[in-house]
Amino acid sequence: MFHINIIRRNKTALLDILSVDRRRILQKVQEHNLITNREYRNLNGIYKEDEEGHIVELLDKIMGKGDETCQHFLDLLETDDIKGTYPELKSLQLRHTSPAVTAPVQETCDEPYPVNTIPRGICLILNNINFENNELKKRRGSEKDAESLGEVFSWLGLRVLIDISELQKLSLKEWSNGFGDLQKPPPKHGDVFICCILSHGKKEVVFGTDKKTIPIKDVTRTFKSSNNSPLTGKPKIFLIQACQGNDYQRGVVEKDLETDEGSVGSVPEEADVLVAIATVENCASFRNTAKGSWFIQSLCQQLREGCSRGDDIHSILQCVNSDVSQKEGSNLPGLIKQMPEIRYTLRKKLLLSPFNTEA
């Protein structure tokens, strides 16, 4: 991951520099056998609105091939030939000689979690739509949220499974350009676990389709670290679209909005967890019956933009907070708002990049 991280840290600058002549760098990576002829044709033939879009695809392809290929790519950028074409490369810190290590080095907060498996991990979506008790309304528009999550996390290289709960009738499906039958063999955990819960909720709990509640803490603690857990030391992300109370943050709801209400070392057991909830304590969250929820739709958009830039998950969720906080649920500005909340015990950065499965 050493050389991958160098590219990731300099990704924005590389986009600006290499976009000046993207065909030149594409030809050079093919000449040095960093990509196949088929990949060269695909990268050369893709349609993008701007030159940076092509370079994004190239860098993602290089990083997806692993650390050794990234090292060769950095070697290429250090050659006089390439620096002659892109003189601004001289200003970047692309030296990739790793210092000699004579003693164990303590991990730092800048070191990202390793994400090397294929698939990179599992994304489990729990989508509660209909409920036994008529007091809890059907969650219209939740299908749109589930589809958006399936699309973006599949794009990020995770295996996406969904449990669509319809009055205790469980239907486990898998995403492949849409939700279909579960594929074989059974899923493996990989390096990342993401759990998306779409349901009604109230303070600190979410509802099952049987109207029984489960505390959010109990959900996350199910996956806590232990000597036997395959997820120990790995990031576990929980994204929860549910109300945390009945209060509105001032104002009146538009008629096309509904609320999700009703309501060798050792690793600490509660480490490596991030929980992002659609709204703060005691308040409602909002879901457009046609377009999906404010929180999930913003999350998927920010993941696409942020992961392409090389941002970590916490930075992306801060962008989600900012985006959702600016939305208005009323024609009168400021009368009805929503503020998502992030809680985490992550010890490192979690970086997810677009994943290309083409040979």
Image (cartoon, rainbow, N blue to C red):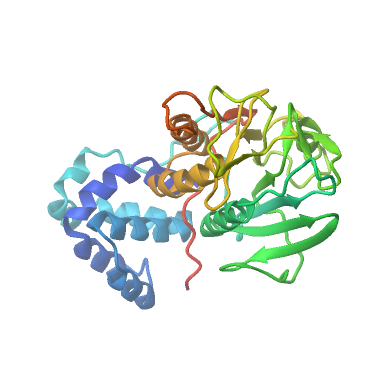
The picture quadrant where one finds residue 68 is bottom left
Q: Give above or below for 149 relative to 250.
A: below
Estimate the x, y position of residue 149 in percent, counting from the top left: 58, 53
Residue 38 appears in the rendering: yes
Residue drawn at 41 percent across, 47 percent down: 305
Estimate the x, y position of residue 359 in percent, counting from the top left: 47, 73
| Image-based side of 314 in relation to 49, left or right | right
| Image-based side of 119 in relation to 1, left or right | right
Depth check: give the residue in front, 232 or 340: 340
Estimate the x, y position of residue 272 in percent, counting from the top left: 66, 34
The picture quadrant where one finds residue 28 is bottom left
Residue drawn at 48 percent across, 46 percent down: 303
Q: How many marks?
A: 0
Residue 79 appears in the rendering: no
Depth check: give the residue in front, 40 or 45: 45
Depth check: give the residue in front, 36 or 158: 158
Residue drawn at 29 percent across, 62 percent down: 48
